Image (cartoon, helix red, strand yellow):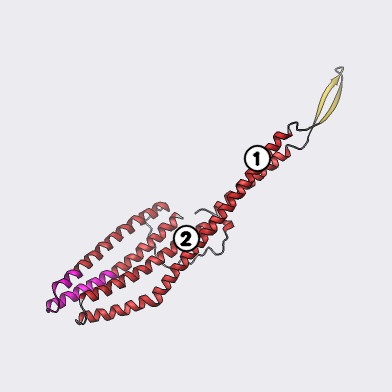
Amino acid sequence: FQIGQIHYKLLYLKALKTLQSENIELYTDFLKASKTRFEVGEIGISAQLAAETRLSQALLKQQQNEDAYTINCSLFNQWILSDTLYEPAQELSILKKSASDSTLNDNVHLQLLKAKRDLAINAVDVQEAQLLPQINSGVKLQNSFGVFPLFAFQAGVNVPLFKKSYKGRIDAANIQVKVQEANIAAEQQNLERKQMDLHYRMEQEMKTMDHLQEYLIPLIDKQSTLNQKAYREGIIGYLEYLDSLEQVIKVKRLYVDALYSYNITSLELSYWMSKSSY
């Protein structure tokens, strides 16, 4: 499970690298357009300073993300005990693996509790068996007058004399069975609540991604292109253009964050539904 988390963190940081490169291109173009308009006297120095500040911040975030990617990549290689540096070739996308084919009965934690219950049931059977009469038998060989060998067979029945003590042990063993069954029921309810919560979170993240992909991202891309042209031509001011740039960056970051959250939640769901603790 931890390896899967680190793997998706790498894919997330990789997606952020791509997004941050796009942001730097936007701010670079903003700075270039601001310098051109400043040189011809259309705007003051404030627009150019704002563009330089945003570009500097974007470059810093890019460097911080590069550092985080390197650290997580090293950590991932430590987990998989790899001699060569591994870097994920795939991109962050919706996790196709689904836990819908499994049931909560496959959960390893639940299986462990059921094994403890079975042991408690076996303990009851052992204690009850000790209340039953025990038949003993044996064969003896001896000589008669030192000449003739004689065989003797002895049989007997042992009856427990202290039945009250054995019944007390049986009652105690039965209590342990009930305790284990209560633990199973409690764990089952806990897993059901966790499953519902994870499914709900995945549905919400999917709705967010669908809305961003179908409506918001195409809309802000179109608006960004129009605003870029309008700013170069002097139709809009730098504050209005800067606001539109930051909206583009914010919305696209929302999509990457939602995609990462969806995959991590799906991974956690698979963990709780799995037959082994991976």
Q: Write the residue at 13% across / 74% down.
A: 44
What secondary structure is marked by label 2?
Answer: helix
Please tell me whether residue 89 belongs to the stretch shown in magenta.
Answer: no
In the figure, is residue 265 to the left or right of 105?
left
| Up/down of 118 relative to 140, above or below | below
Dividing the picture into quadrants, the one containing residue 48 is bottom left
What residue type is disc 2 on? Leu
> Is residue 70 at all visible to an observer of this figure?
yes
**Residue 224, position as x, y percentages in the image:** 29, 77
Q: Tell me the element at label 1.
A: helix
Task: Please name the residue that numbered disc 2 is placed on.
Answer: 267
Residue 208 horizontal side relative to residue 273, left or right: left
Count the marks: how many? 2
Assess whether residue 34 is covered by the magenta stretch. Answer: yes
Vertically, is 165 above or below 183?
Answer: above
Q: Which residue is mark 1?
A: 172
Magenta-colored segment: predominant secondary structure: helix
Percent across and percent down for residue 174 are 66, 43
Q: Nearer the viewer, residue 56 or 75?
A: 56
The answer to which image quadrant residue 125 occupies is top right
Marked residue nearer the N-terminal end (1 or 2):
1
Task: Specify start and end residues of the magenta stretch as a single range.
Answer: 22-51
- Residue 115 in the image: above or below residue 41: above
